[in-house]
Image (spheres, grey):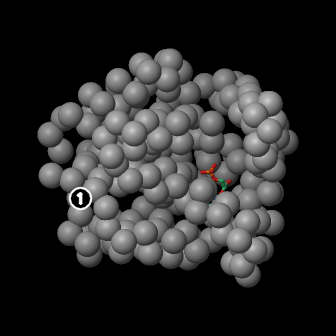
Amino acid sequence: MTVNIILLGPPGAGKGTQAQKLVDDRGMVQLSTGDMLRAARSSGTEMGKRVAEVMDRGELVTDEIVIGLIREKLAEGGKGFIFDGFPRTLAQADALGKLLEETGEKLHSVIELRVDDEALVNRIVKRADEARAAGQPVRPDDTPEVFSDRLREYYKKTAPLLGYYYAKGELQQVDGMASMDNVAAQIEKVLDRQG
Ligand code: AMP
């Protein structure tokens, strides 16, 4: 059976890092709407220009845009999707449910990476420092100021999804404060459960 999962958690929780590990270890397909939007903005398309401003303010781009991006990627097919940073609103969650149904796919689980808020700001500052040290571009939204807006967006619009998936019996929680390898091991345990 194909295993499709959602990684849920605030910015800086480690969703991207864990998704990358699942790609390497299991050959799953990472669908990060953040990465797709960053690609769109750097390609300079009209849509890219529109979303850049919203992203730099730490706000969410419209449901219509991100659902469109995910719909395209799902149509390409693949083996086991990791939804990373999507869905972020209840409307997106409903849309994903419908898209999966249309393609005959099932959701195995929704994995919440639980982390303390104080740790998050430090992780973001570290991510920016590491990018700088490696000569890589620093994300314009990885500043403490924009970060607090991103966190507010998370609590306002995305945290309600925890209840949404809990009610469906799909929510699994892992301790995101543990080491990277330990978090990965906790996720493996969830994936090995029969869906
Ligand atoms: P991320 O890389 O997941 O932290 O996303 C970076 C930024 O892209 C977010 O702060 C939002 O502005 C935008 N974004 C990413 N995914 C979504 C989504 N599912 N819905 C709305 N906006 C998103």
Q: Tell me residue 75's x, y (percent).
A: 36, 74
Left of 88 or right of it: where is 95?
left
Residue lying furthest bottom: 46
Query: Where is residue 4 drawn, in percent x and y?
Result: 30, 52
Where is mark 1, residue-wise? Answer: 106
| Residue 29 percent location from the top left of the image | 38, 53
Asked if residue 149 shows in the view, the reply is no
Name the residue rendered at 80%, 66% in the picture.
Answer: 53
Q: Residue 175 versus residue 153: which sits nearer the camera? A: 175
Going by the numbered disc 1, the residue's amino acid type is: Lys
121 to the left or right of 164? right
Q: Which residue appears at 65% of the width and 64% of the height?
A: 39
Q: Is residue 51 above or below residue 19?
A: below
> Neighbour class for label 1 at 10 Å: few (<14), some, many (≥20)?
some
Residue at horizontal 62%, vertical 48%? Answer: 154
Query: On the image, which quarter does residue 173 sit in?
Result: top left
| Residue located 74% across and 59% down the image | 55
Question: In the image shown, does 167 or 3 lie closer to the viewer?
Answer: 3
Taking the view exactly as shown, the residue that stands out farthest to the front is 135
Please tell me how many numbered marks the rendered image carries.
1
Which x, y percent locates residue 101?
Answer: 25, 70
Q: Is residue 191 left or right of residue 70?
A: left
* Residue 129 found in image quarter: top right
Image-quarter location of ligand 1: bottom right
Element type where label 1 sits in the image: loop
Q: Quadrant of residue 184?
A: top left
| Residue 45 at least partly seen | yes
Q: Is residue 3 left or right of residue 85?
A: left
